[in-house]
Image: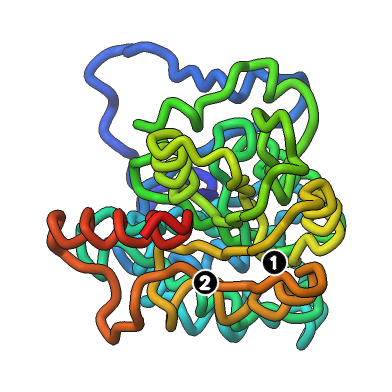
């Protein structure tokens, strides 16, 4: 998050002197390269509309800075919806105001209730048109790094919306990556299977985003299901048609394409990427969606219910029930 320069107290008064000299502040990220590069992190008051409005305006005035607004929970974007709708998503189309602001919205069903689980992914996808936004769901540390680096250097500037769970990826060993993976390559909008030896034997491809991939991976290992491949859609908009089409061509024996999402059928990405996926299906290959049933309230607050729903969803996606 950005911050303003230090200011003096009113009326020409001076701040009280410090009790002692104290240690000098050191920010390791400031020393990554020579030149006027600074890293600043600030906690803001819980007034999402005013804070996000400030960040958006600052991003227009400081186009060379990477500005990040991170919500404590995904649904905190609700309080700033007017700025998202009228400025961040449409400011360039209406006034030519290009912003590189990044919004980090914790999103991922973890059994902690509707207010602390959902960043309303479908709402952001509904705002997407003419390449106005980027919506991403990174699933590894390297993908996170390359995504933010791409955002810092991107020209022309475009707002970035990142959906990621509150804490599950920290606890997921398969999401960790060696340092070398950050030093090489870049952000990949689609991640393919890295361990399949016979892609031609695959009959079912399951495409998902975010932490759900790891639940699918564990269940497939437990079931010894070699005929299913798991692909990760790391960028939902702009939709990576060419990259996904190229990967699907590897699976010449494909008999079923599945989109799996943690969200309910009336939420999440399915209503917005269904046509994109259908267009990539080979002739005669059906497309289906594995998701929670539609609800008005969204994710449950019960851990027991959440685990039962998640298990049923994974089994449905892998065709194991």
Q: Is residue 40 left or right of residue 33?
A: left
Specify few, some or many for label 1: CA neighbours under 10 Å numbering under 14, 14-19, or 20 or more. Answer: many
Q: Residue at x 81, y 79 (%)?
A: 130
Of residues 18 and 230, the one drawn nearer to the viewer in this rendering: 230
Specify few, some or many for label 2: CA neighbours under 10 Å numbering under 14, 14-19, or 20 or more. Answer: some
Q: Residue at x 57, y 81 (%)?
A: 271
Residue 298 location (% of width, % of height) = 29, 76
Q: Please say whether residue 52 is visible from this viewpoint.
A: yes
Q: Label 2 near label 1: C-beta < 8 Å?
A: no
Of circles 1 and 2, the one toward us is: 2
Q: Gap between marks 1 and 2, in whole Å?
A: 19 Å
Q: What is the number of callouts on the image?
A: 2
Q: Residue at x 26, y 13 (%)?
A: 20
Residue 288 location (% of width, % of height) = 56, 73
Of residues 156 and 41, the one drawn nearer to the viewer in this rendering: 156
Q: Residue at x 73, y 74 (%)?
A: 276
Mark 2 = which residue? 289
Q: Please say whether residue 10 is visible from this viewpoint.
A: no
Figure colour scheme: rainbow
Q: Secondary structure at mark 2?
A: strand
Q: Quadrant of residue 85?
A: bottom right
Res 257 label: none
Q: Is residue 38 left or right of residue 170?
A: right
Mark 1 = which residue? 237
Of residues 190 and 106, the one drawn nearer to the viewer in this rendering: 190
Of residues 212 and 61, the one drawn nearer to the viewer in this rendering: 212
Q: Earlier in the sequence, mark 1 or mark 2?
A: 1
């Amino acid at each position: 998050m950005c911050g303003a320069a230090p200011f003096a107290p009113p009326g020409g008064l001076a701040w009280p002197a410090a009790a002692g000299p104290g240690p000098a502040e050191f920010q390791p990220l400031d020393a990554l390269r020579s030149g006027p590069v600074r890293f600043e992190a600030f906690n803001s008051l819980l007034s999402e509309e005013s804070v996000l409005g400030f960040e958006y305006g600052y991003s227009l005035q400081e186009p060379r800075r990477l500005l990040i607004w991170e919500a404590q929970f995904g649904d905190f974007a609700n309080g700033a919806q007017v700025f998202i709708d009228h400025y961040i998503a449409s400011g360039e189309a209406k006034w030519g105001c290009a912003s590189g602001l990044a919004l980090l919205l914790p999103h991922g069903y973890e059994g902690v209730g509707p207010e602390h689980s959902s960043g309303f992914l479908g709402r952001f996808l509904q705002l997407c048109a003419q390449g106005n936004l980027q919506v991403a769901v990174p699933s590894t540390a390297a993908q996170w790094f390359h995504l933010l680096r791409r955002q810092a250097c991107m020209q022309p500037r475009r707002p970035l919306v990142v959906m990621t769970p509150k804490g599950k990826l920290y606890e997921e060993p398969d999401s960790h990556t060696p340092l070398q993976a950050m030093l090489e390559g870049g952000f990949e909008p689609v991640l393919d299977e890295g361990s399949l030896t016979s892609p031609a034997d695959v009959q079912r491809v399951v495409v998902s985003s975010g932490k759900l991939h790891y639940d699918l991976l564990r269940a497939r290992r437990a079931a010894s299901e070699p005929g299913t491949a798991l692909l990760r859609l790391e960028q939902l908009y702009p939709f990576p048609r060419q990259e996904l089409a190229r990967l699907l061509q590897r699976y010449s024996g494909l008999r079923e394409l599945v989109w799996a999402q943690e969200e309910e059928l009336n939420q999440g990405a399915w209503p917005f990427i269904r046509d994109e996926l259908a267009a990539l299906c080979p002739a005669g290959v059906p497309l289906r969606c594995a998701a929670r049933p539609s609800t008005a309230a969204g994710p449950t607050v019960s851990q027991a219910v959440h685990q039962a729903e998640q298990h049923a969803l994974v089994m449905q996606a892998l065709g194991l029930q």
